């Protein structure tokens, strides 16, 4: 009886470990999609990704956006509003999951010229009806080293 219990426990642990790894990879890929969608002003992707309750706190709380504002900005850029963002590159990303909440943190280098700005970010995702939704994003510019 004891070996059967231990084997069952091992299988259960392996299952949850695999479950967690799958969700981490999903969030990693989804977060890459977020960066790409911002660069390309992909309104459809953003509409699908952002929770209705989405909050984006920009550098030093200089601007706080909700879903409506983020989509409106992407729509304006799609319609021809000038956008000087040339590239967005994420690095050193980490994914942490607790229950149905995932946090992705790391750095994004945004090239708007004349020199790129590095931001630290922390994004909070919630698993809702089997689908990850971006609930919150906080970005902070990292001062240039002199």
Image (cartoon, rainbow, N blue to C red):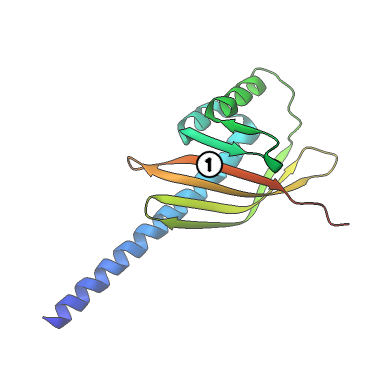
Query: How packed is label 1: few (under 14 Cα within 10 Å), some, or many (20 or more)?
Result: many
Residue 21 relative to residue 57: left or right: left
- Residue drawn 42% across and 44% down? 126
Image position of 36 with respect to 44: above or below: below
Rendered location of residue 27, percent (x, y): 47, 49
Residue farthest along the front direction in this orientation: 61
Q: Which residue is mark 1?
A: 136
- Residue drawn 65% across and 17% down? 79
- Residue drawn 75% across and 51% down? 142
- Where, quadrant-wise, is the C terminus in this rendering? bottom right
Image position of 133 with respect to 43: above or below: below
Residue farthest along the top direction in this orientation: 79
Rendered location of residue 132, percent (x, y): 42, 43
The one nearer the camera, 29 or 93, is 93
Image position of 68 with respect to 142: above or below: above
- Residue drawn 51% across and 35% down? 54
């Amino acid at each position: 009886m004891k070996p059967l219990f231990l084997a069952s426990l091992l299988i259960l642990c392996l299952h949850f470990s695999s479950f967690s790894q799958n969700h981490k990879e999903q969030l990693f890929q989804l977060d890459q999609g977020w960066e790409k969608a911002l660069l390309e002003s992909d309104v459809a992707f953003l509409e699908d990704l952002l929770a209705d309750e989405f909050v984006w706190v920009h550098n030093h709380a200089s601007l706080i956006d909700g879903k409506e504002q983020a989509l409106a900005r992407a729509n304006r850029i799609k319609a021809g509003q000038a956008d000087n963002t040339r590239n967005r590159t994420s690095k050193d990303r980490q994914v942490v999951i607790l229950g149905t909440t995932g946090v992705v943190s790391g750095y994004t280098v945004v090239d708007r010229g004349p020199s790129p700005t590095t931001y630290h970010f922390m994004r909070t995702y919630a698993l809702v009806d089997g689908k990850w939704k971006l609930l919150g994003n906080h970005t902070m510019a990292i001062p240039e080293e002199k």
